[in-house]
């Protein structure tokens, strides 16, 4: 895997604090709201991009008509995308071609073909793409790129990787109450295709000595958790890994909240994921509040 901005953060070789960030869709209601919350957290937002709104300001942040202009004028290296789904692909492609090295796609209901095309573009330019349909990524006390509330996250030595935004907040809050802090929490997205998947994130973080625990928050549908189990078994990942799988009571072959959360036949069930993870030495919590106890006691 090529070195990239995200891998440098997760490996610990670079500090994400202070990296210049732009917001695509900053003049929209959602973009403006979360720009303010990210600024309040200390995220260094240097630019916004909304075609036709160049020359204006949002919360003191200059707005540009294009990513190319924003990057040239401000040196932005990361983008958080709040544009509507029909504009998602063009927004991501524009950001990457302008030199952005990490794009966080908050947008929901992005067509799978657009996700695949945006991922191809990211790989072509050695950029990282998180999402779409993600709450974002946070390094507590250093940077927040997304829409997650900040209260559940305290700094520490645990990496949280999750397919569910809400469960990311809930389980991180249980960890906080147990005195277990977070190195980084990444919502990889709830869609069938994740631009940065569990294994890619684990590979980036595997040699970081500041990360001692990893929490995988999965859900029914797909085989992402089974592939994590195979990765751990085949590579001998030397971190404490525990997991929680949402959807234990979900009916089969019925689409649930996330596009990826559907069971077909015996594939993608909680039981199949739990068996695979257990076989790799990863304990699986039955309920979210059991995760801190597993983190504490796993050998």
Image (cartoon, helix red, strand yellow):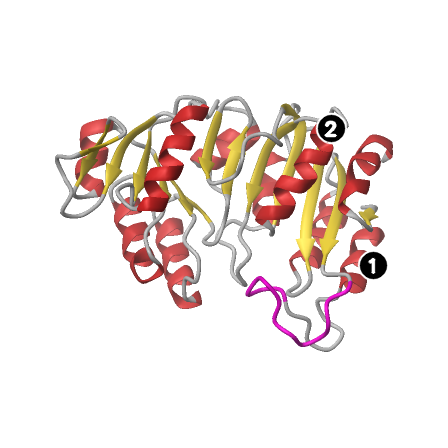
Q: Pinpoint residue 91: horizontal percent, then vertical percent.
A: 29, 51
Magenta region:
249-261
253 within the magenta span: yes
185 within the magenta span: no
Q: Pinpoint residue 21: horizontal percent, then vertical percent.
A: 34, 32
The residue that mark 1 highlights is 275
| Quadrant of the rendered image containing residue 182 | top right
Q: Pinpoint residue 212: horizontal percent, then vertical percent.
A: 72, 28
Evaluate whether residue 67 shows in this view. Answer: yes
Q: Specify the quadrant that holds the C terminus.
A: top right
> Which residue appears at 61% of the width and 30% of the height?
153
Evaluate whether residue 199 shows in this view. Answer: no
> Which residue appears at 77% of the width and 28% of the height?
178
Mark 2, secondary structure of its residue: helix
| Quadrant of the rendered image containing residue 276 | bottom right
Q: Nearer the viewer, mark 1 or mark 2?
A: 2
Left or right? Give the position of 152 relative to 138. right
CA distance separating discs 1 and 2: 29 Å
The residue that mark 2 highlights is 177
> Which residue appears at 35% of the width and 54% of the height?
121
Left or right? Give the position of 207 relative to 100. right
> Which residue appears at 27% of the width and 29% of the height?
59
């Amino acid at each position: 895997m090529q070195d990239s901005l995200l891998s440098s953060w997760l490996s610990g070789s670079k500090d994400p604090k202070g990296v210049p960030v732009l917001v695509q869709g900053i003049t929209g209601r959602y973009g403006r709201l979360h720009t303010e919350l990210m600024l309040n957290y200390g995220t260094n937002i240097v630019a916004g991009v909304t075609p036709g709104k160049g020359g204006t300001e949002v919360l003191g942040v200059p707005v540009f008509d294009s990513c190319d202009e924003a990057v040239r004028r401000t040196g932005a290296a990361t983008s958080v995308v709040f544009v509507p789904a029909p504009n998602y692909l063009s927004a991501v492609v524009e950001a990457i071609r302008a030199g952005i090295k990490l794009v966080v796609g908050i947008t929901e209901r992005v067509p799978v073909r657009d996700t695949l095309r945006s991922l191809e573009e990211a790989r072509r330019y050695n950029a990282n793409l998180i999402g779409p349909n993600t709450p974002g990524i946070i390094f507590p006390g250093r940077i927040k790129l997304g829409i997650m509330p900040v209260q559940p996250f305290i700094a520490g030595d645990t990496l949280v990787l999750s397919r569910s935004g809400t469960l990311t907040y809930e389980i991180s809050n249980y960890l906080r109450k147990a005195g277990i802090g977070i190195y980084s929490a990444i919502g990889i997205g709830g869609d069938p295709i994740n631009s940065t998947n569990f294994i890619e994130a684990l590979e980036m973080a595997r040699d970081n000595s500041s990360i001692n625990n990893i929490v995988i928050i999965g859900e029914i549908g797909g085989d992402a958790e089974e592939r994590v189990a195979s990765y751990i078994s085949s590579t001998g990942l030397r971190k404490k890994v525990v997991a929680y799988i949402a959807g234990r009571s979900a009916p089969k072959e019925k689409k649930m909240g996330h596009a990826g959360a559907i069971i077909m036949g015996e594939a993608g069930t909680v039981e199949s994921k739990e068996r695979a993870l257990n076989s790799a030495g990863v304990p699986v919590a039955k309920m979210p509040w059991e995760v801190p106890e597993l983190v504490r006691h796993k050998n």
